[in-house]
Image (cartoon, grey):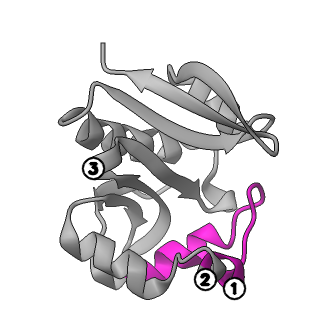
């Protein structure tokens, strides 16, 4: 596999972030469902323009995955990788970039995900704990800096 590198997302990456997000096999969603939640191309572009909050995994200028945070809340908001590139360590690198940025201002981070998902197990293996049920099959996980 050719080299994959992680860099800060740029506003010009937003369309590819949405492509990745709508291509996954777990925690699936559509453009219309994202729009109904207020997650639009323009809202994500504004977030990226306002502060460093997203990272992309790139191979030959193609975005293979991304992670995104809500910096002021200490929240890991999203981490997704195209299905064909899962299991190659890309998700770990993307989550690490997000964690590094969040730990600058927060000693405890949080995220929400489905309790019985591969994502939940991925986060548990990476040290996320203090699991709390939040309803509808979802959980909140936390990760402490030290």
Label 3 to label 2: alpha-carbon separation = 23 Å
- In the rendered view, tell whether residue 20 sits above or below residue 45: above
The quadrant where residue 107 appears: top left
Task: Give percent across and percent down for residue 59.
Answer: 41, 65
Label 2 to label 1: alpha-carbon separation = 5 Å
Which residue appears at 56% of the width and 18% of the height? Answer: 130
- Identify the residue position indicated by label 3 in the image: 72
Instruction: For label 1, count other residues whose C-alpha is less than 10 Å away and answer few (under 14), some (14-19) or many (20+).
Output: few
Task: Give percent across and percent down for residue 9.
Answer: 31, 67
Which residue appears at 59% of the width and 42% of the height? Answer: 112
- Identify the residue position indicated by label 2 in the image: 35
Q: Nearer the viewer, mark 1 or mark 3?
A: 3
- Identify the residue position indicated by label 1 in the image: 32
The quadrant where residue 55 appears: bottom left
- In the rendered view, tell whether residue 141 sits above or below residue 95: above
In the depicted view, which residue is nearer to us: 26 or 71? 71
Q: In the rendered image, which quarter contains the C terminus? A: top left
Which residue appears at 39% of the width and 32% of the height? Answer: 109
Which residue appears at 60% of the width and 68% of the height? Answer: 21
Secondary structure under tag 3 reads helix
Label 1 to label 3: alpha-carbon separation = 27 Å
Q: Earlier in the sequence, mark 3 or mark 2?
A: 2
The quadrant where residue 129 appears: top right
Question: Is the residue under label 1 in contact with that under label 2 (CB below 8 Å)?
Answer: yes
In the depicted view, which residue is nearer to us: 123 or 5? 123
Relative side of 111 to 120, left or right: left
For the magenta stretch, what is the residue range?
13-34
Question: Is the residue under label 3 in contact with that under label 1 (CB below 8 Å)?
Answer: no
Does the magenta-highlighted stretch encompass residue 88? no
């Amino acid at each position: 596999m050719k080299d994959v590198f992680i860099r800060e997302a740029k506003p010009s990456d937003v369309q590819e972030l949405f492509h990745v997000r709508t291509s996954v096999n777990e925690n699936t969603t559509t453009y219309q469902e994202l729009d109904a939640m207020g997650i639009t191309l323009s809202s994500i572009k504004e977030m990226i323009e306002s502060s460093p909050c997203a990272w992309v995994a790139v191979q030959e200028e193609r975005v293979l995955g991304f992670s995104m945070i809500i910096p002021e809340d200490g929240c890991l908001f999203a981490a997704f990788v195209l299905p064909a590139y899962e299991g190659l360590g890309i998700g770990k690198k993307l989550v690490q970039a997000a964690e590094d940025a969040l730990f600058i201002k927060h000693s405890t981070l949080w995220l929400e995900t489905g309790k019985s998902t591969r994502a939940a197990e991925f986060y548990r293996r990476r040290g996320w704990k203090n699991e709390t049920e939040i309803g509808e099959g979802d959980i909140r996980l936390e990760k402490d800096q030290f």
